[in-house]
Amino acid sequence: MSKKVAFLQGNEAAAHGAIYAGCTFFAGYPITPSTEIAEVCSVELPKVGGKFIQMEDEIGAMSAVLGASLAGAKALTATSGPGLSLKQEIIGYGCIAEIPVVIIDIMRGGPSTGMPTGPSQSDIMAAKWGTHGDHPAICLVPASVQEIFDETVRAFNLAEKYRTPVMVMPDEIVGHMRERIVFPEPGEIPVIDRTAPSVPPEKYKPYDTSFGDIPPLAAFGSGYKFHVTGLNKMEDGFPTTKAPIVQAEEERQVRKVEANKADIMKWEEYMVDDAEIVVVAFGSTSRSARFAVNAAREQGIKAGLFRLITFWPFPEERMLEISKKVKAFITPEMNLGQCNGVVRGCIEGNAPVYGIYHVDGEPVNPEEILKKMKEVK
C-alpha cells in the first residue's frame, strides 16, 4: 500500500508529527511565525481524543502543558522568540521537576519584538541558558519539512525517555516553507512512552534514584500521589536544603542527558572525510551550505558540510576530531556568531573559525559561503 504524501508547510508538519508521537494536549498563545502549529492542533487533536486550549499568555501556556504532562498526557506548546522568553521561568520549573514536554520555537528576529516575520537562528543559546541555574538541555534544529515531522516525533521520544523538556527550533524559513512530505505508517517511527512505576502507590517516590538517573513517572489521577515543587527536592519530591542531597540531585539531572549524548546527538556529515574547509550549519542555512559545498567541489575546493540536527547537546568530541584534520571552519548563521562561539570552544585552537552573520531578516545565500571559502582556502 502506498504511503500518504502531502504538500505541507513546516509548521503544519510539526503539528502532525506531534500527533504521530502520541501528543494529546496543546496549550499555547498565538505568535508569528508559529501560529499555524496551534491552528492545526486545534483542528486535529480533537479527532484523536486530544485537547487544545488557547491560554491567556505564554506563561499560562507553559504551565498548562506541565500540568497536562503530570496528568499523563504527552503535551506540546509552540511559540517564537518573545514567547520563549516569557516561558523561561516555567521551563526551568519543568527541568527541576523533571516533567516531559515538547516546546517548538520557530525562530524569528529579536531581541524583543524584533522582526516578527523575518527568519533568525538567534534563540539557540536560550535553549541552553535561557532559564537560570544548571539544568539539562536538549534542542533539535530540523532543516526541512520532512525533518520537522521526524524530529518532532523524536523530541517527544527524548522528552519521555529522559523526563525533561525538549525544544525543537526550526528557523522561520523552515517553519513556513512548503515541501513534499511522506507520512510514516503507524509504528514505522518508534514511539517511546515514559516508564511507569513498578511499585505500588504506597511505595512510590517520584525521584527515587534506586531506579537510575531517570526515575519512573506516575500520572496524577492514576492512583499515585506525589509532591511536585520548583525547589531542590528529596526522593519523595519534598523540598530540602541539605547540601549533599542538593548537589547530588542537580548533578543527576544534568548527567541523565550528558551521559546519554550518544543516544541524543544527531548530525550529518557531507563530504567531510577529505575536506580542508568544513562548514558548520543548521536549519535553512545548512541548505545554502550544501549548495555552496557542491559548487566549491566543482571548483576544486575541498569543502564539506557538518550539519547539526541536534544542537544541544553539542557534538564537541566529533568537532574536536575534525579540527585536527582541516584548515578552517566556516559558520554561516542568522545571528551574530552563536554557533561560531560554540565551535571555537570545542576545537582548542586547532583551526581558525570564520563566521558569516545575518541579523537583517535575510537568509545566508550560497554565494556568500562560497566567497568565504575562496577567501580562507
Image (tube, helix red, strand yellow):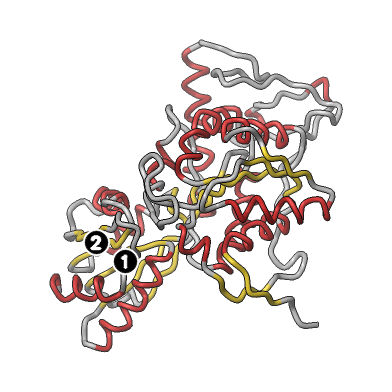
Q: Residues within 10 Å of mark 1 (few under 14, many from 20)?
A: many
> Which residue is rendered at x = 64% and y = 15% of the image?
238
From the viewer's side, name the closer residue of 15 and 244: 15
Q: Residues within 10 Å of mark 2 (few under 14, many from 20)?
A: some
Q: Please, what is the three-letter code of the amino acid marked with disc 2?
A: Ile
Tag 1, which secondary structure?
loop
Quadrant of res 181:
bottom right
From the viewer's side, name the closer residue of 135 and 50: 50
Do labels 2 and 1 touch, CB within 8 Å? Answer: yes
Image coords of residue 178 (percent x, y): 56, 71
Q: Which mark is residue 68?
A: none
Residue sitting farthest toward the top? 241
Q: Which mark is residue 364?
A: 1
Mark 2 — residue? Answer: 356
Tag 2, which secondary structure?
strand
> Which residue is rendered at x = 52% and y = 34% of the image?
87
Quadrant of res 331:
bottom left
Query: Label 2, label 1: how many angstroms apart (C-alpha)?
Result: 8 Å
Image coords of residue 277 (percent x, y): 23, 71
> Which residue is rendered at x = 66% and y = 59% of the image?
17
Placement of the N terminus among the 4 image quadrants? bottom right
Q: Please, what is the three-letter code of the amino acid marked with disc 1?
A: Val
Image coords of residue 145 (percent x, y): 56, 67
Residue 281 to residue 123: above or below: below
Apparent side of residue 185 relative to residue 180 in the rendered image (left or right) = right
Image coords of residue 309 (percent x, y): 47, 60
Disc with the residue nearer the chain's start (2 vs 1): 2
Residue 275 to residue 27: above or below: below
Quadrant of res 72:
top right
Apparent side of residue 262 relative to residue 317 in the rendered image (left or right) = right
> Which residue is rendered at x = 13% and y = 72% of the image?
375
From the viewer's side, name the closer residue of 33 and 207: 33
